[in-house]
Image (cartoon, rainbow, N blue to C red):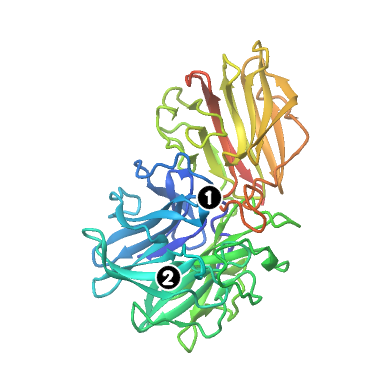
Amino acid sequence: MATIKNPIIPGMAPDPSIIRVDDDYYIATSTFHWNPAVQIFHSKDLVNWKLISYALTNNEVDLRGTDTPAGIWAPHLSYDKATQKYWLAYSHMQNMSGREFNADSFAMWADDIKGPWSQPIYLTSIGFDPSLFHDVDGKHYVSILEWETRTGYQAPGHIVIAEVDLVNGGIIGDWHRVTTGFTTRGCVEAPQLYFHDGYYYLLLASGGTGYAHGIEIGRSKNVFGPYEANPTGEPIITSSPHHLFSLGDPDAGHFEMYNPNSLMQKAGHGSLVKTAEGRWYIAHLMSRPLPNTKLNPLGRETSLQEMRWNDSGWLEMADGSNFAKLKISGIQGPQNSHQFDIDTDFDQTEPDLCFMTPYRTQNSDWVNTTENYGSLRIYGGNSFFSKFNPAIMATRATSLDYRAETKVTFAPDHYSETAGLGLYYDANNWLYAHLGLDDTEDRIVLKILQAKLGERCDYVFSEVSVPEGKVELAIEYHLGQAQICYRLNDNGQWQSLSEPIDVQYLSDEGVNGAPGEIGGFTGLFNFIGAVDAHQHRSYADFDYYRVTNKE
């Protein structure tokens, strides 16, 4: 029997929704301000996972201008056995100001998990985190959080359920308010319905998406309730089992619930699946802080816990506890510890699936592998402070100890044209080692630019001449420290461009947040990219791109 080491999908892979169709397992995860939107991973054994596609690839949404951490939230996968169609529900969070949380929710279907997917079917704007349930009688239901905006009412609101018409679109009848939660942790969201042994079970995320996060459950004989709470009165999965009363708190970091006895933090927001062998698992999100901090650069990752049904018909972890584990028993193995390393030399017709772009969509007008075969050509776009048209090709950081490397050729003719390698969280927070012209515009140099909470930091004393406009760049990332290295020829020695730079702030808790709140919940990326605030016509050629994880 295999041992599964969590996370099964490291790096930004939050809000996992898992299904099994025959012998195949699929997980969909949130992508926020990143395109293409909604990652879909595949596995045969629950142990090894591979990114196989995205769901939103045809300009179904416009993410330009999106504030962190809005965008595409909590996709939910389901499979309708009657029609043999895959369904995906998701929310497009457009505004979070004033705690209004304006989101439109949609559903799409496909005959194949890789698509093509249908055009989005509008569901509702009542809240966020929709999920679909296909009942055995042919009816379909959507459950979602109804976001509460009234002063003096329990926030964030009720979980509501309604019948939905998936053929013509639209809600059938009324919304039914069924619960504000099954424990005292509050902040319930991400409802998901399941039917087992005569009961409808409602799985909820609770406690906010910080250190108090958890998964709770209730059940009913009727899909619209009333739902009885799990008699333990506590989450069935969490990283912090200590009791918490937090009703009315709409969301918070809950840093006081950090568990010093656990390497896994924030376990919550789960999705249930049954294996062909009859075993039960929940896929859920989690985080791994930097040592001696409460900063999580990799964002929220996907993990797995084995479950069982007890004699009273309640779902619980296989060991009888509610404490999320880093290692569990699996159905097969072994687990490939380097399955999320990246090594591409751009000799294919399309960039690798692992590349994502913030805010804007990828298209051949600004990025392609055809104009200079064997390299990725990126035409410069906006400054990386822009939320509209940055020319960035990025991959999720999946380890706290890794090396990212590339080779770039660039011939700028204006001081606002640059190209290189960097680390990226969002438009306000990044680190960028790049080729560009020096201030006198008479030679090409390699230098460093940084954004921290929207402030610009130019490393003017870390500048190296690169006469031919060609350089290999590497970033050695280790526990929140970034060492930038370079070499000017293939056989040369790697040299440091500066002292190691503290980039711990490139984390969910290190960006943009008010005291006690999490500033984001997306995660760190590595990127190659180019800037041209001159004429948008300069380009850089990248010969290869590698990310090697060391843990």
Amino acid marked by disc 2:
Ile
Q: SS for tag 1? A: loop
Disc number placed over residue 367 in the picture, else none: none
In the picture of the structure, the residue carrying the numbered disc 1 is 69
Percent of width and height locating residue 17? 44, 62
Q: In which quadrant is the N terminus drawn? A: bottom right
Residue at 43% across, 43% down: 36
Indicate the quadrant where residue 178 lies.
Answer: bottom left
For marks 2 and 1, the one nearer the N-term is 1
* Label 2 SS: strand
Residue 269 on image: x %, y %: 51, 65
Q: Are marks 2 and 1 in contact (CB under 8 Å)?
A: no
Q: Position of residue 454 (x, y in %)?
A: 63, 38
Which residue type does callout 1 highlight? Pro
The answer to whether 470 is drawn above or below residue 79 in the figure is above
Q: Is residue 311 visible?
A: yes
Kindly give the residue lying farthest to the front in the view shown.
151
Q: Eyeballing the image, is 140 above or below 124? A: below
Q: Residue furthest bottom?
A: 311
CA separation in Å, label 2 and label 1: 22 Å
The picture quadrant where one finds residue 63 is: top left
Q: Residue at x 55, y 26 (%)?
A: 531
- Give the residue pinned by disc 2: 159
